[in-house]
Image (tube, rainbow, N blue to C red):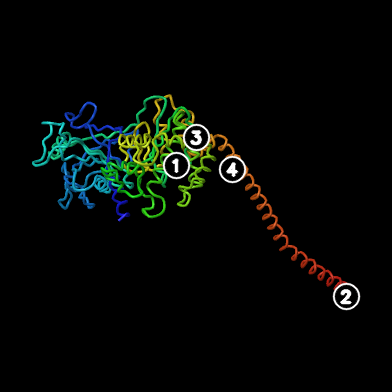
Amino acid sequence: MKFVLSLVLASRLLGVSHGAAVSSQLQVHIPHDLMKSGGYDHREALFGVPPYGGSIQQNVYYANSDLCDPNVDTRAGFPERPKDENGNQLPWPSPYILMVDRGGCTFVIKVRNAQRSGAAGVIIADNTCLCSAGDACISEPGVDCETQEPYMADDGSGSDISIPSFLMFKQDADPVKKVLTDNKMVRLEMAWALPQPDSRVEYELWTTPTDMISREFQRQFKDAAVALGKHAYFTPHMYIYDGVMSGCRMSDGTDLCYNLCTNDGRYCATDPDNDLDKGISGADVVTESLRRICIWKVYGETDGIGVPWWEYVNEFMFRCDKEEFFTNKQCITDAMKHAGVDPHRVQACMEDAGGLENDNTNALLESQLASKEASGVVIMPAAFVNNAAIRGALEFSTIFKAICAGYAAGFEPTVCNKCASCRDEYSCVETGHCSTAAAAGAVSSGVFAASMLILVLLFLCLGAIQYKRQQSSMQSEVRGILAQYMPLDKTNNKVQSAVDDDDEDDLQFTIS
């Protein structure tokens, strides 16, 4: 029962979706009368990998389907295409943007199926009007309007999706579908950009003390935070959820969520090992989360770099990141001391915020809940640069390049100019120089000169060896030839001597 309760709470957590900052644009270029100044309102999916700084501008094909079936019929839909020798419509010609209807299954399933069919991007046409649209939108019979558009949240399985997708409001999608079903062309643009407000980039990380995916990033990024210096401001967030909203806390103050929450059910976290009877509990995760929030508040909030925070996280992962040490006070104190963190200042911060006992509100944890709601974070871990959600793997390279792309032109810090185009950004930041010169794939002049010198010496050595081999071979051949003729000379000498002797004998006989 306790295990089921943990899963139910986790599902509630993943099911809540809020809005993230819009960093994209949706525009119709053809037909011209559908072009809208400033583009169309839309919702950007919280999954997939948009080409930040780029755009996708392609013809649109309407699948005339909800695309919940993985067997996508690429020969159906509109506009109609020429037919092949069998009388079937030709498939949608790649590359294309696919428009599908909302409903029937999750957004992730629709986009995944579209991706498998070859789509470069997906537009999901809403099937429900916004109440604020008024007479501009016509609802289907028996369907009530919505007060706000849903957000395209990840259902937890969207990590394999690499194409971007938007949700287009019904009052805007209907005219586009009308043009397509009339067998006329629609050309649409999906564009993305990282906001570039000033000379400083703000970046955020949402994680938990038990998150496995972000650990390598947290181990590596301290050097980058230091190198970026005052040109960037980092804010770490700890992902907890509201126990009151999740039904963990009854009206009489009773905590229904066992050991998942602190403060009588107010602040909760999922159980990392899915066993409520032993191991690390959700309440333990909340406690460590508050501790890290306080370490940042004391040591990082002022400069936005927070070296002691990075050091503590790494020391904790090295020393205490095991079930038997996760809540061990001595282990945690040792981690703080090795990171240069004062345990007394951190404890005072945790208590001053409201603590973790009884039915008390905690100001710092309340702040985390408010930030989570405002940012629209659903899946852990998550990263934002200038309020724009960063899709794809949480890796050093991904975040570092996104930060460097977030500066206004001319304000990029030295480390970005030096390392953002390197093949190994982390090595460049760590050592202070790029092993591949200014551009990925380039070779420095020193390396090139040394390589050429080595090649010249190698060829000279090979040439000398070959010359000696040829000389040795010629000498062997000469010796062989001489060896063949020398026995003949000896034989001729013997024969000649014998002839001379016979002649002498004959001569003597004649004279006598």
Report crowding for label 1: few under 14, some 14 to 19, many 20 or more residues within 10 A (C-alpha).
some
Marks 4 and 1 sit apart, C-alpha to C-alpha, by 40 Å
Residue wearing tag 2: 509
State the residue lying farthest toward the right: 512
Marks 1 and 3 sit apart, C-alpha to C-alpha, by 15 Å
- In the rendered structure, the answer to whether residue 88 lies left or right of residue 191 reads left
Residue 72 percent across, percent down from the top left = 22, 50
Asked whether disc 2 touches disc 4, contact meaning CB atoms under 8 Å apart, the reply is no
- At x 43% / y 30%, what residue is drawn? 233
- At x 18% / y 45%, what residue is drawn? 103
Residue 489 percent across, percent down from the top left = 76, 64
Q: Secondary structure at mark 2?
A: helix
Of the image marks 2 and 1, the number of the one nearer the N terminus: 1
Residue 146 visible somewhere in the drawing: yes
Report crowding for label 3: few under 14, some 14 to 19, many 20 or more residues within 10 A (C-alpha).
some
Marks 3 and 2 sit apart, C-alpha to C-alpha, by 125 Å
Q: Secondary structure at mark 3?
A: helix
Q: Amino acid at mark 3?
A: Val
Residue wearing tag 3: 307
Q: Amino acid at mark 1?
A: Phe
Residue wearing tag 1: 217
Q: Which label lies toward us, 2 or 1?
A: 1
Marks 2 and 1 sit apart, C-alpha to C-alpha, by 118 Å
Q: Which label lies toward us, 3 or 2?
A: 3
Residue 395 percent across, percent down from the top left = 42, 42
Asked whether disc 4 touches disc 1, contact meaning CB atoms under 8 Å apart, the reply is no
Residue wearing tag 4: 455
Report crowding for label 4: few under 14, some 14 to 19, many 20 or more residues within 10 A (C-alpha).
few
- At x 44% / y 33%, what residue is drawn? 297
Q: Which label lies toward us, 2 or 4?
A: 4
Q: Quadrant of residue 376?
A: top left
Q: Amino acid at mark 2?
A: Phe
